[in-house]
Image: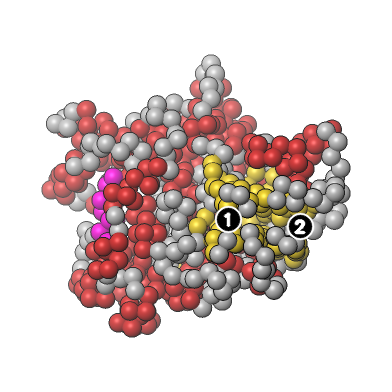
């Protein structure tokens, strides 16, 4: 169930505005709708029929209808919570997990958030307290945006719902656009739209007449810290296996009669999930995979290994350049951010295939790389910290070979160039952003392509401080790798992977994503595991590989970490005529973000260096970002229709 709403701290209520807002996100809930109206609040919900339970329509009310709620997502421990609430005297009218929200609020108020195990965003209107309470899950799986205009708070699951409000002006946020490119997602609750914000993961807001809107956090990543006492590695491996298996089953048991599937990439994480499903007795699983005509980025051979033993239907989408070009503008409309890589487009095509096959939700392996140190950025961070202790040590600096792409190490000269580059990042004063320093330095070149007026508006120190502020409540005692992990969980996972490449392209086709690796018990367990068991030397996800080496095919266990890749800037350069409308002087003037001359100079350089494998990757990303920024605001100015 997906929703939007308006909270008024004034007396005028636009006529039937809530229906217009929910109408803009009908793809998130095509199976029905429900509304609540009062002199202060309007709430609306779109229904995605995953499970039909008795009287499960929204909005939901408490016994005397003084509290009303709209909710989206899944509460995995709702049966347990329902039984607890009944024992305290609460009466339920339905068997729907959404009704738990109103009674939890009655009983515990804001403290209810600590009791919910699930993925969610919701809004509660407390009529007696004259306040609205909105909140979002710890990992940021379910989105929640808001805008405040003329003493009115508008909120919804997508920005395009808020854009239906005539009073909300749609215009680019220069700081948001800069941060989206450099940090994966904006800081300080910003979006790439001026005056439209998002509730952060682990965040909530209270809205009332006295204080207006106040946004707070109810959880921080280091709150997961606990001691896990294990006597042997085998005991730890058993605990990982048992916890992950429970997480998988928990995400299936509520909806046993609904068709579901799994995304199979060919990597370690999704292969673990499908092999554990076999152990649990599921062997007719609808599976969905991506293939590419470019053999260099195609993972079909590894996907076939994961599929061994599955009797269910397998759907493989083979993606061509033409597919990406034809779907790009539609994907941008749903993502509501510009892209610097095109990974969201094939993922949109994959969810479309799942929907066509009648699948209501899919399991995905997202989260494992963050929890078990699977990305090269963990290796890079370890390398830099290790080298900072003795920069002159050849043994230490030779560790760079563990995360530089093998194809780039064509000579000792090139390797020395990489060493020299990374040597400038051995030290760092900003402890939580230390892991991102090389990325920030490279990506900040996007500023050179902003027009002169916008460039003058960007205060780099202020931005750095605001990004760092997001982690100011985290424990300062964390290791350098745990600090890197906190950044990955907040900026990359929540800000990009679960949104742009997750929820936004899944729900564009009315398919829900579920993520067993993001089970709170597994996160807590993974957090407690020593760094050297997750990154053993430079061997990523070591303990995960060891735990599941008996069920995952050896070629996948021994396979080097492969980053999901799609065609990039070469697609634009080869088909530049199809994007001319986004590169005209009139377009640059209309949206007022980038410098026309500098961008066209960049395009010329990229064409001249198109065959150079050592060309600047940030420049490739910049060209994609410019074009998709113009695509986004073309769609937004048309109110995302």
Q: Is residue 472 left or right of residue 219?
A: left
Q: Determine crowd level at label 2: few under 14, some 14-19, many 20+ residues with C-alpha closer than 10 A.
A: many
Q: Quadrant of the C terminus?
A: bottom right
Q: Is residue 612 left or right of residue 475?
A: left
Which one is in front, 409 or 120? 120
Residue 304 is covered by the magenta coloring: no
Residue 443 is covered by the magenta coloring: yes
Secondary-structure class at tag 1: loop
Residue numbers of the magenta segment = 437-447
Secondary-structure class at tag 2: loop
Image height of 375 relative to 15, above or below: above
Image height of 229 relative to 106, above or below: above
Residue 76's x, y, as percent?
70, 42
Q: Determine crowd level at label 1: few under 14, some 14-19, many 20+ residues with C-alpha closer than 10 A.
A: many
Q: Residue at x 38, y 47 (%)?
A: 467
Residue 117's x, y, as percent?
66, 40
Q: Residue at x 82, y 52 (%)?
A: 65
Secondary structure predominantly adopted by residues drawn in magenta: helix
Figure quadrant of residue 13: bottom right
Tell me, for residue 144, which label it has, or none. Answer: 1
Q: List the residue tagged with mark 2.
A: 59
Q: Residue at x 42, y 51 (%)?
A: 187
Image height of 580 relative to 255, above or below: below
């Amino acid at each position: 169930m997906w929703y939007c709403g308006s909270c008024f701290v004034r007396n005028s209520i636009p006529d039937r505005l809530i229906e217009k807002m929910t109408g803009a996100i009908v793809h998130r809930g095509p199976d029905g709708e429900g509304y609540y109206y009062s002199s202060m609040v309007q709430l609306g919900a779109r229904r995605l029929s995953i499970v039909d339970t008795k009287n499960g329509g929204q909005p939901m009310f408490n016994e005397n209808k003084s509290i009303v709620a709209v909710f989206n997502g899944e509460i995995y421990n709702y049966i347990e919570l329902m039984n607890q609430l009944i024992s305290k005297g609460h009466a339920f009218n339905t068997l729907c997990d959404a009704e738990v929200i109103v009674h939890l609020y009655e009983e515990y108020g804001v403290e209810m958030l600590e009791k919910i195990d699930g993925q969610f965003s919701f809004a509660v209107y407390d009529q007696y307290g004259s306040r609205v309470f909105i909140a979002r899950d710890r990992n940021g799986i379910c989105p929640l945006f808001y805008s405040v205009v003329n003493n009115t708070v508008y909120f919804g699951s997508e920005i395009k719902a808020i854009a239906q409000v005539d009073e909300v002006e749609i215009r680019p946020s220069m700081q948001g656009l800069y941060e989206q490119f450099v940090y994966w997602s904006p800081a300080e609750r910003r979006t790439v739209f001026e005056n439209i914000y998002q509730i952060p993961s682990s965040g909530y807001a209270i809205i009332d007449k006295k204080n207006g809107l106040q946004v707070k956090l109810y959880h921080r990543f280091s709150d997961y810290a606990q001691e896990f006492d294990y006597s042997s590695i085998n005991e730890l491996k058993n605990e990982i296996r048992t916890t992950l298996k429970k997480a998988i089953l928990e995400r299936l048991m509520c909806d046993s009669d609904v068709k579901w599937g799994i995304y199979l990439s060919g990597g370690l994480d999704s292969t673990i999930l499908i092999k554990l499903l076999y152990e649990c007795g599921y062997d007719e699983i609808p599976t969905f995979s991506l293939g590419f005509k470019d053999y260099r980025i195609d993972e079909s051979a590894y996907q076939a290994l994961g599929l061994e033993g599955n009797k269910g239907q397998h759907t493989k989408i083979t993606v061509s350049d033409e597919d990406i070009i034809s779907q790009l503008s539609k994907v941008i409309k749903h993502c509501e951010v510009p892209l610097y890589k095109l990974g969201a487009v094939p993922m949109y095509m994959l969810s479309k295939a799942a929907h066509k096959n009648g699948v209501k939700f899919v399991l995905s392996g997202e989260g494992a790389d963050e929890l078990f140190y699977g990305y090269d950025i963990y290796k890079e961070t370890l390398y830099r910290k290790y080298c900072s202790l003795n920069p002159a040590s050849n043994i230490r600096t030779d560790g760079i070979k563990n995360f530089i792409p093998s194809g780039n190490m064509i000579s000792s000269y090139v390797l020395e160039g990489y060493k020299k580059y990374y040597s400038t990042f051995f030290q760092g004063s900003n402890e939580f952003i230390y892991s991102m320093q090389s990325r920030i330095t490279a990506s900040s070149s996007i500023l050179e392509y902003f027009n002169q007026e916008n460039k003058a508006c960007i205060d780099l120190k202020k931005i750095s401080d605001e990004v760092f502020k997001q982690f100011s409540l985290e424990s300062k005692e964390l290791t350098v790798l745990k600090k890197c992990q906190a950044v990955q969980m907040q900026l990359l996972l929540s800000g990009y992977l679960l949104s742009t490449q997750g929820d936004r392209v899944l729900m564009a086709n009315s398919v829900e994503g579920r993520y067993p690796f993001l089970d709170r018990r597994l996160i807590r367990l993974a957090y407690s595991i020593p760094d050297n068991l997750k990154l053993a030397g430079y061997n990523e996800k070591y303990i995960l590989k060891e735990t599941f080496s008996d069920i995952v095919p050896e070629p996948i266990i021994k396979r080097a970490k492969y980053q999901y890749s799609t065609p990039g800037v070469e697609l634009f350069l080869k088909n530049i005529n199809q994007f001319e409308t986004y590169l005209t002087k009139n377009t640059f003037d209309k949206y007022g973000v980038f410098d026309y001359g500098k961008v066209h100079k960049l395009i010329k350089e990229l064409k001249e260096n198109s065959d150079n494998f050592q060309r600047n990757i940030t420049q490739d990303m910049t060209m994609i970002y410019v074009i998709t920024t113009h695509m986004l605001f073309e769609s937004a100015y048309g109110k995302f229709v």
